[in-house]
Amino acid sequence: MSEEGAPERDPAGGATPGRNEVYVPSRRRIERERHRRGRARRSTAVAALSTLVTAVVLYLVVVDAPGWPRTKETFFDASYAREAFPKVLDGLWLNLRLFAVCGVVVLLLGTLVAVARTLKGPVYWPVRALATAYTDFFRGLPLIICLSIVVFGVPALQLQGVTTDPVLLGGAGLVLTYSAYVAEVVRAGIESVHPSQRAAARSLGLTARQTLRHVVLPQAVRRQVPPLLNDMVSLQKDTSLVSIGGAVEAMRSADVIVGRSLNYTAYIVAALLFVALTVPMTRFTDWVTARTDRHRGQGGIV
């Protein structure tokens, strides 16, 4: 406690404001803030300069390559890009719809499979065995093979009432594969919750189902948001693989244009559109990861 009327001192040497005083930072604090700002400016300048130098070197290497004129004509033709852009953009709308629907189904199915794998007791052994077999099989099966089997194999069965739409079948193949990956992510989150959390919830009178729903799953999902978002980024890109069944999405639209014109600029247009969709989600994932790490370091996540 300071004496009555005497200003208190902060750790940096400045006086903390009293009831009738205005805070004035100390000279040491002002110098430290000035040093931090100067260091930040230097770091920004060095990063910008190194980026510029790297870009110039890469540009000179590419432009001076013997085959650059032919490559520029084949992959970077502005007239073909203008022709391909609206058609590829129309196909991209199918990719977005597939991602929106499949993403929700993947999260729900993956969570159910993860919960099934964490059920305790011998009576649940068949459920655990089926969930384990599902995740092991579809995590080991390449996505392109899974899509080929579903898209071409299901119509070959000629089952009554079963769709033969390549978009729906391709979406089913994406869900089967990505649900297995998401299930393992969620299961890791569930098992990372300390057993004392379950014990505390049960001691308060919650049932096993209520404990899982209100205590365990919220903590598990919150801890696994970054890897879940990474899976969603991959799903967003892999929606283009449904084109193997004939679905006209962005990649298929570009393929049609390339087959007609024998110019590959349409592929570059499709690639840039996918990158424009993926980069914001990737940056959002990085932000969530950094935020989670900060909260965990401050004790904000149990």
Image: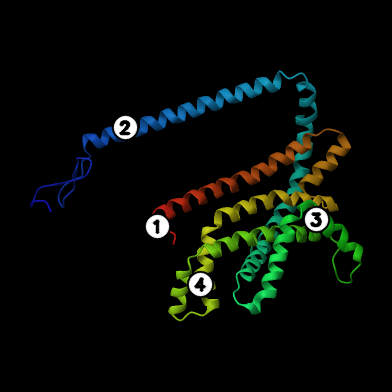
Residue type, numbered disc 4: His
- The CA span between labels 2 and 3 is 58 Å
N-term-proximal mark, 1 vs 2: 2
Residue positioned 41% across, 30% down in the render: 41
- The CA span between labels 4 and 3 is 36 Å
Q: Nearer the viewer, mark 3 or mark 1?
A: 1
What residue is shown with label 2?
Answer: 34
What residue is shown with label 3?
Answer: 147
Q: Pinpoint residue 100: horizontal percent, then vertical percent.
A: 67, 58
Contact (Cβ within 8 Å) of mark 3 with mark 1: no
**Relative height, residue 116 to residue 7 (above, below):** below
Q: Quadrant of residue 130?
A: bottom right
**Relative height, residue 61 to residue 193 (above, below):** above
- The CA span between labels 4 and 2 is 48 Å
What residue is shown with label 4?
Answer: 214
Q: Nearer the viewer, mark 1 or mark 2?
A: 1
What residue is shown with label 1?
Answer: 299
Q: Nearer the viewer, mark 2 or mark 3?
A: 3
- The CA span between labels 1 and 2 is 31 Å
User: SS at mark 3?
Assistant: helix
User: SS at mark 4?
Assistant: helix
Q: Nearer the viewer, mark 4 or mark 2?
A: 4
- The CA span between labels 3 and 1 is 43 Å
Which one is nearer the viewer's eye here, 230 or 121? 121
Q: Pinpoint residue 19: horizontal percent, then vertical percent.
A: 16, 52
Q: Pinpoint residue 163: horizontal percent, then vertical percent.
A: 85, 65
